[in-house]
Each structure stands twice: as structure tokens, then as C-alpha cells.
Image: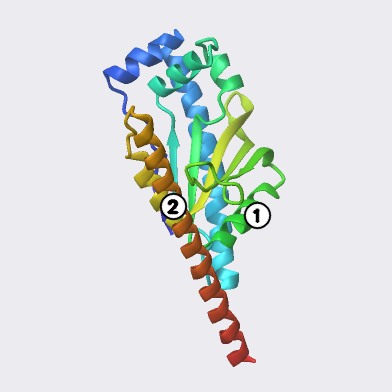
Amino acid sequence: MNSNNEFLIPPIDDDYMNYADAFQDLDKFRQVMCWYGCAIREVRTKLEVLNDDFRTNNLRNPIDNIVARIKDPRSIYEKLRRRELPISLISILENLNDVAGIRVICPFIDDIYTVSDMLIEQDDIHLISKKDYIKNPKPNGYRSLHLLVEIPIFLSGGKRIMKVEVQIRTIAMNFWASLEHHIHYKKNQDDVEYAVSQLTECANVIYETDMKMQQIRKQLEFEGKLKMD
């Protein structure tokens, strides 16, 4: 399994400083971002432990890769402004759910639900919401399982409960989402509708491929068990 060694902290450059200053206390802002980073470490460690245990007992990894990121100050600021919310640290903690994000990439669709179930069954993980865009894809074809969880982190000043968004998808779904992210729609409505239809078609083909690959894997596993018996 590939896993980035550190969560992706936005670079502290002039842009970072300018937007972080909007929250009035730069040191406190960086402290809050540290809390989110600690929450990411907690969740990612749980996922890595589950993956190691699964591999030991089942000879197969349900997780191919884990990527984590903290939303940069500009994105936080602009999201609060769009939603007409106060520009403050309390507002971030109370109103934004995706400041800390983890993306889990799985080989097969059934791995997604296996990983999700194993994660949210843990005593110190509290599931706030679950959105299944695999069974109910977005209009453009986007598929992924989104979990919003709360997890405790233990600091020198005591325990804090932090939110982390976990997105779980297959390698193929992530390939589609990565390419879709780089497509910029034109203002012409006909172009937008054409792009959406083509993206949806590609997403459906990728989903069918995911299902076919899963069927092949299960058939091979079944035949392997028959030979062992």
C-alpha cells in the first residue's frame, strides 16, 4: 500500500499568510490547522492498521493508497464567504466539514464497503453522515463513498473532538475523478451539456469495468478454493 508520509500541509507562502491573517490570529489559525492534522493522523493510522490486519488474515489488501490533505486558507476563507458565514476560527470548527480530508483508494468496489464498515465500527469513531455516490452517482457520473466522522485527539491541553471527511473510491473511480477535475467547462450551455453527457458516459463505462474486474476476482478466488478443497 502506498501512503504519503505526511499529510499535505499547504505551503506557508505570501498567499497563505494573507488569507490566514483574515482570521485575525495567525498563531491560533495554525494551531487549529495542527488539530486537523492530528485528526488526519489518527484516522489514517486506523486505516493502515486495518489494512495490515486484513492482509495478514486474508492475503489481500483492501486499500491500495491513502492520500490526506488540509484545506488551504484561501479555500477556507472563500467557502465561508460563499456561505455567508463569519470569518473566524470558531466558524471553521463549527461550520466546515472538509478542512481535514482523507482519500482512500481501493482495488475493488466491495473493498470500499469493507473498509467503511471496519472504520465506523470502531468505538472512538463517530459517524456524522454517509453519502453513497456509488449507488447514487452524481449527474456527471461521479462515484465515491463519503463519510464524515468525528474522532478525539489528545493534546497537552486536553481532548478535542475533530471532524474528518473520508472519501473512499476505487482506482478506476479515482482515475475518472482526477481527469474530470482538469476539465474546465465553457460558458456555452451546449458545450456544458455535451461535456456532462460525455463524462457520464465515461463514468458508466468505468463503473462497468469495476464490476467486471470484481467478478473476475471473485471467480478466481472461488476456483482457488475448489482446488484447495
The C terminus sits in image quarter: bottom right
CA separation in Å, label 2 and label 1: 32 Å
Decide: is 98 above or below 114.
above
Left or right side of 115 for 33:
left
Looking at the image, which is closer to me, 227 or 180?
A: 180
- Report x, y in % for residue 37: 48, 33
Residue drawn 66% across and 53% down?
Answer: 117
Mark 1 — residue? 118
Q: Earlier in the sequence, mark 2 or mark 1?
A: 1
Is 127 on the left or on the right of 216, as rendered? right
Q: Is residue 117 visible?
A: yes
Q: How crowded is mark 1: few (under 14 residues within 10 Å), some or many (20 or more)?
A: few
Tag 2 residue = 201
Task: Point out residue 204 in the picture as x, y percentages from the top left corner.
Answer: 48, 55
Which mark is in front, 2 or 1? 2
Residue 64 in view, yes or no: no
Q: Check contact, mark 2 vs mark 1: CB within 8 A.
A: no
Q: What element carries label 1?
A: helix
Q: SS of the residue at dot 2?
A: helix
Residue ID at (61%, 85%): 225
Give how far across and how far down residue 36 sits, in percent.
51, 30
What is the three-letter code of the residue carrying label 2? Glu
Q: Where is residue 35 in the image (x, y as percent from the top left)?
A: 52, 28
In this rendered view, identify the residue nearer to me: 49 or 192.
Answer: 192
Hey, what amino acid is under mark 1? Met
Give left or right: position of 125 versus 205: right
Q: Could you say which is closer to the camera, residue 202 or residue 116?
A: 202
Compared to residue 222, the image places residue 150 above or below, namely: above
Quadrant position of the N terminus in the picture: bottom left
Asked where in the image residue 161 lies, by quadrant, the reply is top right
